[in-house]
Image (cartoon, rainbow, N blue to C red):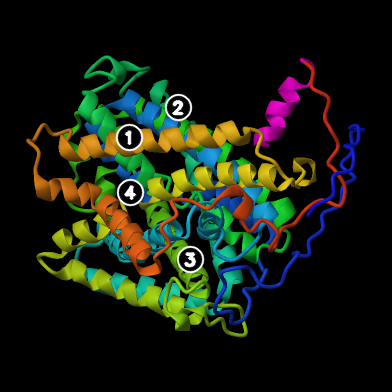
Amino acid sequence: MASTPPAKEYDGKDNTAVDTQPHDDVEVGITHKQGDLKRDLRSRHMQMIAIGGAIGAGLFVGSGSALHQGGPASLVICYSITGFMLLLTNLALAEMAVLYPVNGAFYTYIVRFVDPSWGFACGWEYALSWLTVLPFELIAASKTIQFWRTDIHMAVWVTVFLVALIIVQIFGVRGYGEVEFVLSIIKITACVGFIILGIIINCGGVGDQGYLGAHTWYDPGAFTNFKGFCAVFVVAAFAFGGTEMVGLAAAESANPAKSIPTASKQVFWRIAIFYVINLFIVGTLVPYDDPRLLGGGAPTAASPFVLAIKDAGIKVLPSIFNAVITISVLSVANSCTFGSTRTMQAMAERGHAPKFLTYIDGKGRPLWCVLIQLAFGLLAYIGESKKGGEVFDWLLALSGLAFLFVWGTICLAHARMRAGFSAQGIDLSLVPYKTPFGVWGSWVGVALNGICLIATFYSSLYPASGAPPDAEAFFKSFLAGPIILFLYVGYKVYSRDWALYVKSHEMDLQTGITLLDEPAPVVPRSWKNIPMQIIHAVV
């Protein structure tokens, strides 16, 4: 149990030291332990994973369908709500990841602080989502090539990209980190570049369109209808998928106490700059009733970003931006292998997955988990089938809501952990990093995730197109809901553990915990330092 000496007065310097040694060697619940992951991710890797890790087709291409369904105002509002929800989630996750930089991260926290059965359900739902997203991303990347060449078979590009992904895995987590570092720089540069270009186009500096202003918000309008507004939440959730990857990387970070909070704060800038500002600008350049947003041909042909550049009459830039989209999609494919493999390996250690998945080789790679993920990549060849699109609709239905369930439960796990700290007398002043939003921020995060789930349910039942309720269409959007409930109830029956949650005084809060040697300095609260406290919360 942690001691509770009196807190020191803040002197402007952080002189506290972090005890980086875990309190116990083996965590309660661990049944199979084989090897350890390598701590090869540096602070620069973590920051780039946070800022640009999940910027991909969800932003550059998926925003086209969201714009068409909901209108430009719905696009900005829904992405902002989802983004704020993710800010709360990531900062809560950062607090837990610094305290417990353990393998499996949020899956482990859910098992320890919420309920083992719900952890089992969320873990498998999360792993399955990345397993099925990989072949989808490989197909999407291959189809982006059709922007330039339609005479080369799609399977050729699937093979090329899959081989490149295999090569990255040879270098383990360091290979993942370096690839994400480079690709994220390219994506961030493209996002900033489009903001500048979009402003120039809007002001009439390029092309013959003249000054545009916010005319698309008046004609055809800022919104479509309420159904369309709800539908945008579905696209936004998919677009932000992977933001939680920073917490998952805690067990392989060289200095999680420093890099995790810094990286998690970057989520604010990613939301504010790379999503909201970009989407606001693109919404002023492309009207939601533009028929080109419906797609046809290469998926990037329906990208509102590419359409805005084409409408401005810029010849070469659409090809350059298409290349950025290809890189972005491959970056998400790279993240797939990290997200699924680390989750499956952690689950296997607890007996929630087959024992052989615990194996970690000498270079810190969960080898069997990587092989399973790459094997799922072979499903990309189904895209050549006439029924390929329908097959992938059902595969993606498994992952559509997984992120919302995981994000909401991360917030719940943080709130439950704090309740455990209170019940077991652990001093919060010894916590190395505390989310500036506190427990209330986590409860708000739970509520916002619930609202997004309700909006998704409504959108699945009553599509934005105005079509009547249809069972097939509903389950293609909401299949992950029944699946996660089936996994939860199934494990309850299997384990015969009928407790609904882990009680605060029974939580395992000591294993692997990293606390300060002495209480953190107390920052005096005053009106003068409120602006700086707000800045420090997100910088």
Marks 2 and 4, the one that precedes in the sequence: 2
Quadrant (top left, top right, bottom left, bottom right) of the C terminus: top right
Residue carrying label 3: 343
The amino acid type found where label 4 is placed reads Leu
The span from disc 3 to disc 1 (Cα, nearest Å) is 39 Å
Q: In this view, does 524 lie to the left or right of 294?
A: right
* The residue stretch that appears in magenta: 527-539
Res. 306 in view: no
The amino acid type found where label 3 is placed reads Thr
Q: Which of marks 3 and 1 is in front?
A: 3
Specify few, some or many for label 3: CA neighbours under 10 Å numbering under 14, 14-19, or 20 or more.
many
Marks 1 and 4, the one that precedes in the sequence: 1
**Element under label 4?**
loop
The span from disc 2 to disc 3 (Cα, nearest Å) is 44 Å
Front residue of 441 and 137: 441
Looking at the picture, how far across and down is residue 481, in whole percent?
28, 50
Query: What is the quadrant of residue 7 in the picture?
Result: top right
Query: What is the quadrant of residue 158 in the picture?
Result: bottom left
Residue carrying label 2: 200
Marks 3 and 1, the one that precedes in the sequence: 1
The span from disc 2 to disc 4 (Cα, nearest Å) is 37 Å
The amino acid type found where label 2 is placed reads Ile
Q: Nearer the viewer, mark 2 or mark 3?
A: 3
